[in-house]
Amino acid sequence: MTLLNTIHSREALLQLTPEQQKQLCREIREFLLEHISRTGGHLASNLGVVELTLALHLVFDTAQDRIIFDVGHQAYVHKILTGRQEQFRQLRTFGGIAGFPKPSESVHDAFIAGHASNAVSVALGMARARTLQKQNYSVIALLGDGALTGGLAYEGLNDAGASGEPLIVILNDNGMSITPNVGGISRHLKLIRTKPGYLGVKMAYRKFTRAIPGGNALYRSTHRLKAFLKRHLIGITLFEDMGFNYIGPVDGSNVRRLTELLRYAREMQEPVLLHVITKKGSGYGPAEEKPDQFHGVGAFDTASGATQPSKSVTFSATFGNTMQELAAEDPRICAITAAMKPGTGLDGFAAAYPDRFFDVGIAEGHAVAMAAGLAKQGMIPVAAIYSTFLQRAFDMMLHDVGLLNLHVIFAVDRAGLVGEDGETHHGVFDVGYLQQVPGMQILCPANQAELRTMLRRAALEMTGPVAIRYPRGGDGFLKSVCTEPCLREGTDITLVSYGTMINTVLEAAVALKQQGIHAEVVKLTQIKPLDMTPVLESVRKTGKLFVAEETVDAGCLANQLFARLEQEGIAAAVGKRNFGDSYVTHGAVAKLYEATGMDCAGLLAGIREVLDHEA
């Protein structure tokens, strides 16, 4: 039996010797490699925080103390140490444990995570709640240096540092988000890492003053002098300027030292920032060498680190290739991404046109506002941002782009379900929020051939804001550009959809024909502004309408179509299928379609309800 197999409680952790702690860290890394190589998941970030997470659990009781993970990519070790080892066989599968912290899963998960830069704000809220309720527990925000590229992190740090609330912010500094970090903050942290420390003297002095009569008063009286000397002899950090007591940098692979400093930070009873240096992918050679490739990974061979190559060209790759073609034709074309260069397919563009490529870090609002500035001065910016993260820039789309009707193109990657990352990452809200921006034009390619033509049209022929929404992965069976909206003629019912969901709708139409039901299939390529003529003409013929959309119900297209039928005085039986007013859990996309009634069988059940209903 391994040592890890004996760890079922915090009490068991507290009984470990220093040598056993080292052994446990080795076994956790072996456990991560064994399981993630089978299920896929976030590997490199978790390998880097093994010792830090163990130290946190040695100092804090996470059943009561609150640890807030920023993003949550690094939460696997925390889950392993809080009784979920056996459940890792079903990591990120439907019905299994999530890849991110999830309070409904365990009392040890203090808050949901999935989007960056909010941990300090959430932690400050919890700290203030603790004070107001006169309770006694610690609050810790754990964020990576990548999160510091997001503006929300500074809003939280600014308020927390000035609050005086006992609060610990742990900066997990590995120089990476998914890819190496960019910008001035990254350079600032690099300078801090190279400065000589004075922490030992500081801790010894604090211990000395606490041990002598009147020591606390002495410490307070010398604090200003100490701050003056530090500012002029060593320099002061951004975090100290914000009001934090800065500790670090400290080696993130030393459990004993981390444990000592965490206890020290807890005893200070004030805002403390502990700067921890970790190495992404630590302990596994391939992940250390290529941490970006092992950030989020599918199944792989642990001996070689080789991953299974993709069998098909993805929408993201096609987008990136088309962007390079457009940039060669028009010098106004430029690309913007928010720390997602590989994910959005822009590696090639960045290499070919470095002067026209901008990675702004995890700062979607800034990306869109900057795009507005580029467009106002005559460039054609294309902002490639995942649907779930573009939500964070809604105000900038509405105010900075929309008000001036600027020609900014939004490449909305990962529209629809994304699978194992779950609720925080599904792109099922953009149909609703994009439609709220006046003047926004929304294109929905059903395949990569249409993506190529739509991106070219959006860049070189259209004006004003344009969003092109496309999914993760590759094509379905419909692969060619469709020039007519009607893909299949019929007389019994009209089936309407857009994007790659049209593949499932066509599958349902084929199944209906086998039952003697002739469905007419109408594919929409643009949902705003929407040409309703093909739908209205079809429904006048069939008298029945069913709309399938890979989105939530609020802002869905079906409601607009149903209202228009009423306005036109067209009596028809209608039905729709979407994700309703709910969040979709994690799991394989096919399983999620089945569970939500968005697979062929689910659509057929909804269609049957319409067929059985008289208008």
Image (tube, rainbow, N blue to C red):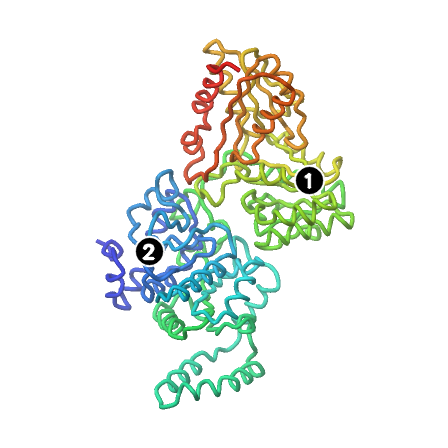
Residue in the foreground of this view, choosing between 164 and 100: 164
Disc 1 to disc 2: CB gap under 8 Å: no
Q: How many marks?
A: 2
Residue in the foreground of this view, choosing between 592 and 254: 592
Residue found 27% across the figure and 60% down from its top: 10
Residue found 50% across the figure and 41% down from its top: 426
Query: Label 1: which residue?
Result: 438
Q: Quadrant of residue 200?
A: bottom left
Residue found 59% across the figure and 41% down from its top: 433
| 405 with respect to 171 (left or right) | right
The kind of secondary structure element at disc 1 is loop
Q: Is residue 189 above or below residue 547?
A: below
Q: Amino acid at mark 2?
A: Ile
Q: Position of residue 57 (x, y in %)?
A: 33, 62
Q: Amino acid at mark 1?
A: Pro
Residue found 53% across the figure and 21% down from its top: 574
Q: Position of residue 125 (x, y in %)?
A: 46, 60
Residue 28: give its label: 2
| 187 with respect to 409 (left or right) | left
Foreground tag (1 vs 2): 1
Q: Position of residue 413 (x, y in %)?
A: 57, 40
> Tag 1: Cα neighbours inside 10 Å, few (<14), some, or many (≥20)?
some
> Tag 2: Cα neighbours inside 10 Å, few (<14), some, or many (≥20)?
many
Q: Position of residue 335 (x, y in %)?
A: 67, 47
